[in-house]
Image (cartoon, rainbow, N blue to C red):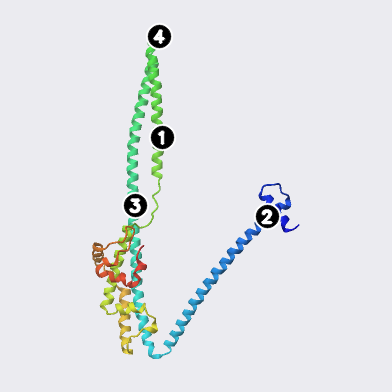
Amino acid sequence: MNLADDLRRFARRLAGEGVSAEDERLVELFRNRAELKKELSALDDERHRLLDRLKLQEGATLRVEEQLAALEQYLGRPEEGYKCLAYFQLRAVWRGAAQRLEQFSGELARQQKDRERNQQLAAFERAKRERLDDLERELVEGRVLADQLQAEQRLAEQKFASLKGFWNHFRRSRLRESIESRRFRIDAAVTQLTDLGDRQHEIESESPPLFEGLSIDGRRAVNLAVIAYAEGLHERIAAAGLADLVRESTRRRVYESSYGRREDCLALMHRAGRLVAEIEGMQDDFADIKARTERLRATATYRADGETVPQYETLQSASLVLLEEYWDVYKALLR
């Protein structure tokens, strides 16, 4: 058997002609071969992806090694030690402010979430109560109607039983028809009461809706307060004369920074250390935060209805906080 015979058998198989068991095995062989080629191609693609990731990681590792070498060389010079300490002290100010901002954002978002969830639950319970009240009125009316019909039916049955003699034949016929008609009405009234009772049970058993997350207005409210908080932090640190130096410490590497002589570095370290302690221990002034937030709300605009971060140019004095991304403010904002 040669390849030409195999192909002819395969062609007959595709044409729907009768095939033998050997032809079936041949078709299965071709099918398995195609699947193996697909798997091999997928594995080859995965191999290339992993090689690309490895090259990227090697590049990142090389850059880190170069930075470490430069840092070792920098720290090997004793005269640079105080500059290094001052640099990391300034970075500590940034981290302290960023942590306070993130904590404030998280707590405020949690409070806003609880507030909106409670409002959602209250609205759900209110609507549920209104439906149950309407249903209760229908139940009362239905019970009154059913009781009235049943009372009328008893009186009619008693009257029917009292009508004796052939001279009451026509009166009994009319009364019998009335009794039958009323019986249908009673059955309908009872059925309606049963349906209303089932509906009442369904409403009472309804679960509150899932909370799908903060609303756009809720996120905007949180973000404005976070920006106001960041503005207050900036003013506090700027008052100590360190806002620009702290910002620069996040944009430069340690060996690219310079803070003057040893005495200058010591003075800067003292100011920065005192500021770190002040930030860690400060009490939030909620009245000031509220006033700042209201001021921002009066001028803030958004690029689209679904946007939750205001345009920085509409925030007046607080625009610098967003423009320069002080205290990693965008990480604390809700998108």
In this view, the residue in front, 157 or 32, is 32
**Kind of residue at badge 1:** Thr
**Kind of residue at badge 2:** Glu
Labelled disc at residue 16 = none
In this view, the residue in front, 195 or 14, is 14
Tag 1, which secondary structure? helix
Depth check, mark 4 against mark 1: the one in front is 1
Q: Quadrant of the N terminus?
A: bottom right
Residue corresponding to mark 4: 166
Residue 249 lies in quadrant: bottom left
Q: How far across and down, in percent of the image, does residue 222 sit?
A: 31, 62
Residue 29 lies in quadrant: bottom right
Q: Earlier in the sequence, mark 4 or mark 1?
A: 4
**Kind of residue at badge 3:** Gln
Tag 4, which secondary structure? helix
Q: Residues within 10 Å of mark 1 (few under 14, many from 20)?
A: few
Residue corresponding to mark 1: 194
In this view, the residue in front, 181 or 307, is 307
Q: Is residue 283 visible?
A: no
Residue 317 lies in quadrant: bottom left
Tag 3, which secondary structure? helix
Depth check, mark 4 against mark 3: the one in front is 3
Q: How far across and down, in percent of the image, does residue 326 sit?
A: 32, 72
Q: Residues within 10 Å of mark 3 (few under 14, many from 20)?
A: some
Residue corresponding to mark 3: 120
Q: Could you give the CA–CA distance between mark 1 and mark 2, rounded to whole angstroms? A: 64 Å
Up-down relation of residue 168 to residue 129 (above or below):
above
